[in-house]
Image: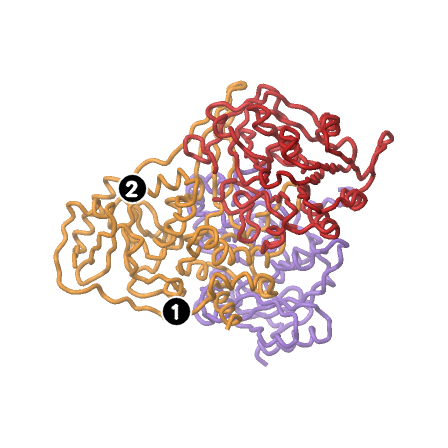
Amino acid sequence: MDVITSGALASWLDRLAAESTLIAPRSVEGVLLYRPVTSSADIARDFTRPVLSIKEFFFPATERLLTIEKTGQTITLQQTLPEGKQVIFGVRPCDARGMKVMDALFIETSPADTYYASRRENTTLIGLACKEMGESCFCTSIGGTPDDHRDMDIMLTEVEGGYAVQAVTSKGKALLEGVPLQERPGHLPKQVITASFPFPETAYWPLRFNDAYWEQMSERCLSCRICAYVCPTCRCFDIRDEPLAVGKDQYERIRCWDSCAGEAYRRIAGGHNPRAAKGQRLRNRFFCKFYYYPQQYGPLACTGCGRCVDACPVNIDITEVMSHLAEVEA
Amino acid sequence: MPYTDEIQAKARELLSRGQTACVIGYEAGPRGRVRPAFIYSPDDAGRLVWNRGCTHNLTTYLCQKLRPHGHNGSKPGRVAIVVKPCDSRAINVLLAENQFSRDQVYIIGVTCDGIVEGAGFKSITEGPLQKRCQQCSEHVPVIYDVLIGQPAPSGKTSGEDKDLARLEAMSPVERAEFWLSQFDRCIRCYACRQACPMCNCPTCLYERDDSLWVGAGIRVDEKRTFHLGRAYHLAGRCVGCDECERVCPMQIPIGLLNRKLAKEMQTMFGFRAGVAPVPSPITTILNGEGS
Amino acid sequence: MIDTNGNNPLMPYLGRLVEVKDMAPEIKLFRVELLNGGREAFASYRPGQFAFVSAFGIGEAPFGLASTPQRGGTLEFAVQRLGSVTTGLHELGEGDIVGVRGPMGNWFPMEAFRHKDLLVLGGGIGGAPLRPVIQTVLDNRPDYGHLTILWAARHPSLLIFRDEYAVWRATPDTELHLTVDQPDPDWDQHVGLITDLLEELAPSPKNTIAITCGPPIMIYYVDQVLRKLGFAPEQSYVTLEARMHCGIGKCGRCNLGDKLICVDGPVFSMAEAGDLLESFL
């Protein structure tokens, strides 16, 4: 296998930070987040996964789509496409899988989203295999593994004195140009994998749609948006026009994150709200991930990262839902 | 009798006698994490627990639960609720603001010696106390129908609010920098607002479809408006349960902002929220008669 | 299927308002002349499709296309003032510029309806997407059988496209029946719900297609009556609505179960609509 020493990795990352935007896990006031770094020394070590996924670098929390300028009766629109290359280091397989899940929607289903596609094109993912699974991780139950390299451009796996390097795509190979690698005999280390659990087939979910379970399990839900926002695959968004400059007739059209868990999500002008009940909203969330999204776009909209499990303030647990359904199915 | 057993017995009694339609309390989930529980049948009362992991302010569920619903505005069933001292003060605030009437709630007050750090997110019932509990000396709820535990004061002295002291030592410019850097990582998930019993507006001012008061963007300007505005709306109403801070996925010290304004309320008006069911001196209740 | 402006499907075409007509209290008819490439995109849109119209500075919202390309290159939309975008549009006048994205969604299978009798039911502003259905039949009269139009509103002043009723009535093999919930002193036609009118007329389902557009509750009750009259679900077509933000199947908002109203609809046969996991009500 090809190996990069820790020292060589640090030098390479420093170079990448200088040449383009390097994004890596970093502690921000005690919270681990993916953030731009100027030096490899800022990068966190020994972590499971940052609180937010990498999706915000392809599908930002707020994104300007175009600007609008009004002069008398004339309107001038200006498309505002993203610019610049980015490299994301320390990507876990669950997050990289999340990007593939979002690709199915944003790129592979016509019409392709110009903004997302541009960011995807201009970003290289350097993955970091997990040595073991976290307490709330369940990637192995969703068809992933903690060392899955398939969705990365480059995959790193920790070995003695450094990292084993796999160039997965041509984009990854190009980024590795000039990077000193050593040939080392041996195989990639084995990951510590927790037992996976069964959950129902996609086709089974519609049979459970009218169960009283959804209303019962959702009663403690706060209808915040934490689960959707930390999720690598959730992608609901809102589009608004908002003033750009005070006193001038200039506006921007932005899109920003939204969540079907929010109470007003489906409320229409006039007041009618077909998902007024929390059970209807949470049912939509889980059905979207395990039935609607696969029906519409192909992949399951869950990668087993476990962030929602960790972050939910009232312990609404996607693995509990899946286990419950599997039990009922049996 | 351990508190858990007492609470279970009370719940069983209330539900089997039809005195309440529901008991809102705490249970432990499959991962061992404590979480809110809604018990409707006496047979399920065995799910209820009480321990130092019972962090949630369950009163946040009361407004929705007790609101008249349906086409004929039928009155919902009476609800029993398990509350700690801080939670009980929230009930006083909600009563003062006519969110529901006293007879709609049966209050199971529990004496409290503090909740542990990590509660709600980890399976944990022992260990260092949460910061808010270190600063608290209240042992007994201020309002209850039944009290679980002894009504004697705990003898625990309240610790100094070091974070507040540090904030107050900052100049206005430093404070602005501090808060803007905190809000920078906010993702406008609204968990703070949703966890708060006093944030109960049907449509939040800061989440309007027409962006009337603040834009929809998840950006620093909008986030500053949301947090500062919310803090002002809570001045004189916030009971300091600090759940807003606990639930924040970005660990933003939201409670600190509220504690600062609570201190101002104490200094300026000698007022502390929820000690009695009276509205705060800076809240105006418009009821059409001489308002 | 969905045309894009320079390949960016979120970038609107510009359109000039060439006519703004008051149709009813709070309802205006906008006629838009597309600029900067929009004409090509909308060269062959079909009845049932919709477009997102922007009131720049406020936002955009979906509106059913109330016109057909066979009758000219301008687009028509009926807009009821209800929220911030529709209010913004109502404040615009002739010569002002709006944005248009589309055409979006699926369409009524007019080819499959040929040589059948058509029963068109429009309630309130819901009649707007049905106007191009009627226009298509009128413009291709020999291709279609008997056309029965039931047109309803809460009050006579809220009936839309009133200045076209004479032409509809004068067309061979075509009948128009109006009904209102609340008459005014001059009203001499049917009073009652569209379902009452439908039950009284009791049209035969034989070789007939019913097309309904209106509030979800109207669609539901009309369907009940149609079934009583013997219409099979496959003979009944409806347009459904849900809150939309992108119109192109990305933002996730408009789903009813696993169907997106913006790409799998808004036109559904009643067989499909009845099969939806999530009720359209």
Relative to B260, residue C8 above or below: above
Classify mark 2: residues with Cα within 10 Å, few (<14), some (14-19) or many (20+). some
Q: Position of residue B281 (x, y in %)?
A: 66, 48
**Residue under pointer 1:** A196
Disc 1: which chain?
A
Q: Quadrant of residue C201?
A: top right
Residue at image location 64% in from the left, 64% down from the top? B142
Disc 1 to disc 2: CB gap under 8 Å: no
Q: Which residue is mark 2?
A: A21
- Kindly tell me whether residue B165 is visible in this rendering: no
Question: Could you tell whether A82 is left or right of C88 in the image?
Answer: left
State left or right for residue C260 relative to residue B67: left
* Residue C35 visible in this rendered orientation of the protein: yes
Q: Which chain is red?
A: C
**Quick one: SS at disc 2?**
strand
Q: Which secondary structure, mark 1?
A: loop
Residue drawn at (18%, 63%) of the image: A160
Dot 1: few (<14), some (14–19), or many (≥20) neighbours within 10 Å?
few
- Please identify the quarter of the rendering in which residue A279 is found: bottom right
Q: Which chain is purple?
A: B
Subunit bearing disc 2: A
A210 in relation to A297, above or below: below
Q: Quadrant of the N terminus of chain B?
A: bottom right
The single residue placed furthest to the right in the displayed view is C185
Three-letter residue code for mark 1: Ser
Measure how far apart labels 1 and 2 are at the Cα level: 37 Å
Give coordinates of residue B240: x percent, y percent. 55, 56
Q: In the figure, B16 relative to B114: above or below?
A: below
Chain A representation colour: orange
- Comparing B264 with C13, the one in front is C13
User: Residue A307: x, y in percent?
Assistant: 42, 58
